[in-house]
Structures are given as C-alpha cells and as structure tokens.
Amino acid sequence: MKKNIIIFVVFILSGCQTASFNPDPALFQKDNGVAFQVSSHHPTGGDAWTIQPGETKILMDEKGPAIIRNIWFTLGGGPDASHGVDLLRKLTIRMFWDNEESPSVEAPFGDFFGNGFGIYKPFYSQYIGITSKGYFSYFPMPFRKRGRIEVTNTSKHQIIIFFHFLGAKYDDLPDDTLYFHAQWRRENPPEFGKNYTILNAKGKGYYAGCFMFMQGYTSEDKLNFLEGDEWIYVDNATNAVIKGTGGEDYFQGAWYFSGGPFHAPHHGLILLDHKNKQVGCYRFHILDRINFEKNIRVEIEHGQRIFNEAKADFASTVFWYQDEPHKPFAPISDDREPTKTVPGLIMDGAVEFEGTTGTHPYYVCTYNGGWSRDMAALISFTKTNDFIEKEFEVEKDNKYSVGINYIMNDHNGIFKVEIDGKKIGCDIDGYFDDPMDAYLLCRNKASGLIHLGKIDLVRGKHKIKITAVGKNNNSKGYKAIIDCVTVTRPH
C-alpha cells in the first residue's frame, strides 16, 4: 500500500514539473508566460492617443507567440462626451493575427463591446462589457507570429482613446491553438422570407456567441421581430443541429423579455426600449460550445416560420474561435446610422377592435403595412347573426364619415356594420382567394380603407356592431378580421 502511494505522488509532481503550457492555470498556480502590456501610456506627453477623421491608427503590433488576456479602452471627443454614434458606431476596431491580410476581428467599436445603435449602456458579462465608460474584454486572443490591433475613425470628428492590452508571451503555443474572431453584420431590413445570418465560417473551431441588436421601424411595432428561431448548421449538414423556440428564448429570456434587462455571466439583455422598439442582448456559448470541423452557419429568423415576416433593423457581432486561414469577411457596411423609429400608422378616427370581448389579436406581417397600429382583431363568427360590439365616443355633434379596413382571406364571411342600430353602407364580403394565415404574424393583405357612408352623431358615447350575415360560396368560414372602423368628421 505504501509503495502505491509513493508512486502516485511522484507521478503528480512529475506532471507539474514538465508542463510546458497551461492555458487555464488554477488560482494557486502560475503559468510559464512572461507578462507584457501595450498601452497608450506616455511618460511625459499624456496618455491619450488622437485619431483624426479618416485616420487609421495601429495601436499594437507585437511579436508572438503570445496571448492577450485583457483589452481595455475608454474614448472621448466627437461633438460631445456622450459616447454616442460618432464614438460607438463610426470608430471601427480590427485585429490581425500572424501577418494575415484579412482581419480576424472587424466591428464598430460599440457593437464589439455590446453597445449597438450608438447608444451607451453599461453592462457586464464574464467575458466582455462596459463599466463606468471603460470598455473591457477577457476573451483570450492568441497569436504565434504577430498580433496587430488598429482602429479607423470614419466620423467627421477627432476622437481620443486611452487603452491597454495585457497578456503574456510564451516559447510556443499548443498545436491545436485556435484564433479569436469577431465580425459585425447588419441587414436593414433583413430579406423577406430569408433568415438573418449571424455567422458563416469555414474551418475548424467553435461558435462562442454573439450580440444581437434589433429594432422595429415604428412606435406601434409589437417586437414581433423576436418571433424568430435560431438555426445552426454544422459541417455541411442540410438539417440544423440546433433549432430554437424564439428570439428571446435563445438569449435565455422569455415572453418578449417582459421581465426587463438582466446581466448574467453568459447571457443577458442590455437594452429594452419599448418607445424606440430597440433590443440589445447577448449569448455566449463557452460552457455549451458548438464545435465545427469544416464549417458552420448560424442563422436566426426575423419573425416566425419560413416567411420571416417581421421588417426590422438587425445587426450582430459574432464571436468564434477557429484555425487559420479564415474565410475573408465581406466589406463592413458603411450604413452605421441607427434607424429612427417613427410613429406607426394610426388611421384617422380609428376605432380599434383588438382586445374587444370575443376577439383574438391578429398581428401583421410588417412587410405588408397598411394596418392601423400593426394589429387587427380576429372575430371567429361561426354562423349568421353572430356579432360583437364596441363602444366609442365623439366630441361634437356632427355628420361623420364611416369607413372600414379589414383583412382579406379565404375564411372570411359576409358581415355588416351598424352604429347605434343603423346599418352603414352595404354588406361586406371579406372573402379573398388567399389562404388564411393566422400563425403569429399574418401575411394576408388589408383591404385598404373603404368608405361605407355617413351618419349624424351627437356628442358622447355610441356603439358599433358587426354582425355575420352569411358567407361566400367559396369561403371556408364566417370569420371577420377587422383592423379598424373609422369615424371621422368631414374636413
């Protein structure tokens, strides 16, 4: 027994003594690296570097073998000190490893560190974040021969930066060392019917995660761009190995991030702005790596199913490790200005039926447009004389013009509109030879505002009644899908 114990102890000590490289030493160990730092430090002239408009400046050009363990920046300049679009979106960061011509890292500065839209928002994760206007990353960045980091100022203003990059140099790196990569993409909007691409890489490595920055175009957007699943294809597979359940689900939230922003080591919600319909979030696959031997494609739907029917501004910064050479990046987009959210379509005098008893919400494919408040009410009439009612109010005695906007498909019946018991206009046949699409985001078309007639109304409350009166012989049902009834005073 004693002999076995002695042999065992000697084996452990021998292993420790001969280890030439330990990428993740325990806290009670040191590795064999010799520390180095590249920074903006200057002993007499101040520590800030100035980047003029249009200028590219090399911040680091260092020989390897080495691993950068931490990078840190802070910024100033521009029209103000707000860390806005000029600093966050119009300053580009690039990194090159081992004399390569195509960068392994290329992204707007803010998007690289998790601040999309040109909006400063502090947050922290285990690997990257922003704390009190300091931008940091702990993603290890190895290189064998040479490591180069540069920035380009595409704004019209002078920018000043402070930085330090801290790492260690080694005699050599393991043969299976993978290189750090990051790429920014933007589609504004993504293509209808096609998934948004987060990553399309060729080589051997693993997908480490991403930031996503998504924004609706109008203040009436319901964040339906989150109704999209992630699809991840590995090594030429035609069937995705990862199939998601929803945009916010992938980022480990739920129900359109109804609980608000949160920061966790590997996932989080940095920004949720309902007024401007902006969402910024992150997910890192470090504990749950997705490996690839030949290639990988990471996609996410914008809106559910194959139609990708939510029209929005999508941007992302993706992180991964792989061997070199990597697939060269497409030129980075010059489209850096954030989208301006505009008021949504609200038809003049609209009486909206969504939320009325007996109806269900019916969301629009936002590529369609033409719906008041981007939503309608599905009324599931099953027979003639079924009806619903909605109360509304007018401010003055006057003659009012009445109109209607409804959604057309092959399940609609024939219905009539009454106000205070008086029928307005003719019966409406809602049938149209287009299959009903009632799944999450409707792609059926709206009729456009149809004038029904005029009615005298006194100041105060009144009631609209919609009643099923029959159905077209070709129709599959009696339904009515009402966007709104409009009640307006003639100009």
Image (cartoon, rainbow, N blue to C red):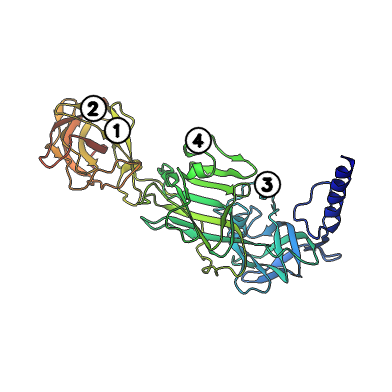
Which label was assigned to residue 126?
A: 3
Where residue 230 appears, as percent x and y from the top left, is 47, 49
Q: Give the SS element for disc 2.
A: strand
* Identity, as a three-letter code, of the amino acid under mark 2: Ile
What secondary structure is found at the residue carrying circle 1? loop
Q: Amino acid at mark 4?
A: Ser
Q: Which disc number belongs to residue 258?
A: 4
Q: Residue at x 25, y 46 (%)?
A: 446
* First along the sequence among labels 2 and 4: 4
- Look at the image and tell me in which quarter the N terminus lies: top right
- Circle 1 packing at 10 Å, graded few (<14), some (14-19), many (20+), is many
Disc 3 from disc 4: Cα separation? 24 Å
Q: Nearer the viewer, mark 3 or mark 4?
A: 3
Label 2, label 4: how far apart the Cα atoms are: 31 Å
Using the numbered discs, state the Cα–Cα distance from disc 2 to disc 3 in whole angstroms: 54 Å
Q: Is residue 339 visible?
A: no
